[in-house]
Image (cartoon, rainbow, N blue to C red):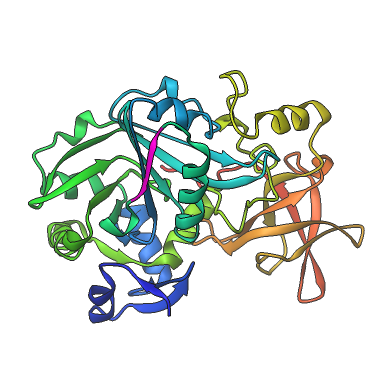
Amino acid sequence: MAQRTPLHDVHVRSGARMVEFAGWDMPVQYAGLLAEHAAVRARVGLFDVSHMGEVVIRGPRALEALNRVFTNDLSKVVDGQAQYGCLCRESGGIVDDVIVYRRAADDLLVCVNAANRQKDFEWLAAHAGGADVRNESDAWAQLAVQGPRAAAVVQRLTKLDLSQLRTYRFGRGDVAGVACVVARTGYTGEDGFELFCPSADGPRLWDAVLEAGQPDGIAPCGLGARDTLRLEMAYRLYGADMDDTTTPLEAGLAWVVKLDKGDFVGRDALVRQREQGLTRKLVGFQLVEPGIGRHGYPVLQDGRKVGQVTSGTRSPSLGTSIGLAYVPPALAAEGSSFAVEIRGKPVAGRAVRTPFYTRK
């Protein structure tokens, strides 16, 4: 049976359409994907992302231990700052992409993908020697308030001065009387906040945010809009665009791989790959003929399979068919032409610059 977030009953009562995702019973939409997507781009939307996991690493060697298994450089992060990066295997393959929140040098919160909660905890416990690693996922609820009106909505509910909270920074304080970690992070490309709170307080916080957002036209949103929003920004989805068989360099995440910071798990393999050259790259594409390239669809050149689509949708903001795909480096340059096989037929497409959507 699928797991349920602390907000499950709220979604069912509100008439959300529920689906199974990463082993969780989650709302895929409320009023509809297009309406929810538009609400986030123009106003503000509220998401339940409590299926995400939280692994906490503590102790005097916590920072050093986590930095040894993280591709980015946590020594550059100060208290109250978050950093995105990957956990890699010795092969360079991606265990997960995560965000690390530095509460203190001896107290780090790692937000992991829903399907990888247990895998990541076991990986960190096995490799972050010298630190205390705990899986606190079930203790937390997490809400995402996203959109150009997000700050106005959350500010009504807290005494924290959100104007002092820059992107990828966080603070701690009450929101609607609920103790929260308030992080200016998100997965939509819009301004917004992710609110971490005790799981039992999740439903109360959800109701308070929805009520506070009524003057701004807030919309409860499901996973459908979350996916189209993130894909317009070309944000990667673990399990679709990358996994244990792909490296951060192939996935276009070289910017979170700090090879000069000192040793970390997977570094040697990534150095070798950089020196030898990539055999495939993840690129953004746009179809120039009708159709939608879905996960797993073949990428063709001259009728021959040369790659594979990892994510695809019709962009609600742009009205075009967009996606991500692994292709040979020769086809990765902007403007390169190739086809995507859709139901046995080649549909013309071309590599384009990402993100597909730029916030106005």
**Residue 78 horizontal/vertical position (percent):** 33, 23
- Residue 311 figure quarter: bottom right
Q: Is residue 358 visible?
A: no
Q: Please determine whether, in this image, residue 287 is positioned above or below residue 175.
A: below
Q: Horizontal and vertical percent for residue 260?
A: 60, 18
Provide the major secondary structure of the magenta segment: strand
State the residue in front, 94 or 248.
94
Q: Give the magenta range.
A: 131-135
Q: Nearer the viewer, residue 97 or 105?
A: 105
Residue 29: % across, % down: 38, 73
Q: Is residue 302 left or right of residue 23?
A: right
For the point 63% across and 52% down, which residue is it?
243
Relative horizontal placement of residue 214, taking residue 317 as reference (left or right): left
Residue shown at 14% from the left, 44% from the top: 155
Magenta region includes residue 352: no
Q: Quadrant of the C terminus?
A: top left
Up/down of 11 relative to 259, above or below: below
Task: Identify the residue at the far front of this view.
Answer: 130
